[in-house]
Amino acid sequence: MNARLVWFRSDLRTHDNTALSEAAAQGPVIAVFLRCLEQWQQHGHGANKLDFWGRGVAALREDLAGLNIPLLHRDIDRFDAAPEALLAIAREHGACALHFNAEYPLDEQRRDAAVISGLESAGLTVHAHRDAVAFTPGELLTGQGDYYSVFTPFAKAWHRQLDGNRLALRNAPAPQPRLPVDSDPLPPLPRLDDSPIDGRHWPAGQSAAADRLERFLRYRGRHYRDQRDFPAVRGTSELSPYLALGMMSHRQCLQAVMGENGGQLADGDAGLTAWVSELIWREFYQHIVVGFPRVCQHRAFQQHTEALAWRDDEAGFTAWCEGRTGYPLVDAAMRQLVQTGWMHNRLRMVTAMFLTKHLLIDWRRGERFFLRHLIDGEFAANNGGWQWAASTGTDAAPYFRIFNPTTQSTRFDPQADFITEFVPELSSVPVKKRHAPVSDLLDSAAYPPPIVDHRAARARALDAFKALKD
DNA sequence: CTAGCATTGGA
DNA sequence: CCAATGCTA
């Protein structure tokens, strides 16, 4: 019947999906999803992300059913089984072509290269589409022909070279004639080491994502710049889980911004343009993993920082993971992560800086812990953020820039509302002292004293980075 | 509140 | 020469 397979990965939507639209324009479509639980867990994804992934596939299956597109579901343990699995499906259904949207981390690129060669040598045509980014990595380069390694010039080039076509939306295809192929039932998520958090705050699927985008832009987008740094305020979009699994495209976000902002992205409302900038950060890190694939192999972007003498401190790491460092904002943030599967962006910087600078613990341990708990865990953004905080990454954060967790607390949680929500044992401490409780208040609050002294820890981190220069 | 810290990429 | 999600004195 000459069907075309569309392999869904982290693009779990029917609207504005490049591969789906391109395939459907050429013939009947059969959708495929390959669940790679062993590989994903090896990559560090935890129960929250895997649960959201599964719910997203279920939502996609329903959306596809409305278009008469069957969804075939296969479990493969690892990426290297993908070519064989796809080839078997293609042969079973007489498919002539495979379409998918490109993914950029190294393991995913290798998987896709193997799929392309495997299927092409079997006589199928394979189409890898640009979808998750406005520019294919490599399209935006410096005057020297290098990948950008600093965000600001990257973002300027992104705006300068953008044209309307790159953000044009593609409608979901019209319903196709029914095929003699049934959708597979979806298997449940097997028992994992951790249980997923209650997912009701994060309904999966493209319609939930669209609702959230609309509400964000209607009520909060214009306040984004001024409110995004206050964790007690829901000033951010909370769209990251949807972007990570492609339940929403960056184009849908940017088109919606333009609709609110007189057709502009770079100028206009300062709140909206600040949010656009954050979307460009996501694309920046997608380009980084292609331009500097070592970051996908547990290595630092700044190669000289590989020599840094990270501390071996199990007790410190455990205290950080469990939210009992004695720094209330850090602890509240870590408890938010573990209890809710999500952490406010400002706090990701604060906690990452605390682990890597105050505790001088290897950023890779924090990166992995985040990925295990985050419902929005995504390699490029997570790695980029961690390396930024650790001063091993892009954008040359001067190594002497070390967040003072108490200053961050008084500035971004002035009433200690966020601290009090997640560290309720401090409720008995006067609000002004909740940022850094003094010792005589701690006993009654059953809250630990700081595990490190800020001044001493800062000096230790500065020394460790200075030593790299010698 | 301002200056000093003192790195780095990129136009 | 500017910019970078800052801190300390």
Image: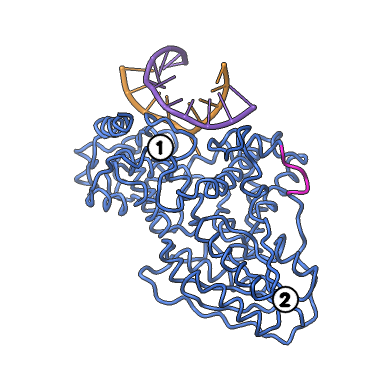
Chain colours: A blue, B purple, C orange
With A413 as the anchor, is A88 left or right in this view?
A: right
Q: Identify the residue position indicated by label 2 in the image.
A: A96
Residue A3 is drawn in which quadrant? Answer: bottom right
Q: Is-magenta flag for residue A348?
A: no
Q: Quadrant of the C terminus of chain A?
A: top left
What residue is rendered at 35% in x and 37% in y?
A405
Quadrant location of the N terminus of chain A in the rendered image: bottom right
Q: Is residue A179 above or below residue A450?
A: below
Query: Disc 1 marks which residue?
Result: A391
Nearest to viewer (mark 2 / mark 1): 2
Tell me the chain of label 1: A
Q: Which residues are magenta?
A: A161-166
- The amino acid pointed to by label 2 is Cys
Give A345 or A249, whichever is nearer the viewer: A249
Q: Chain of mark 2?
A: A
Query: In the image shown, does A385 or A81 lie closer to the viewer?
Result: A81
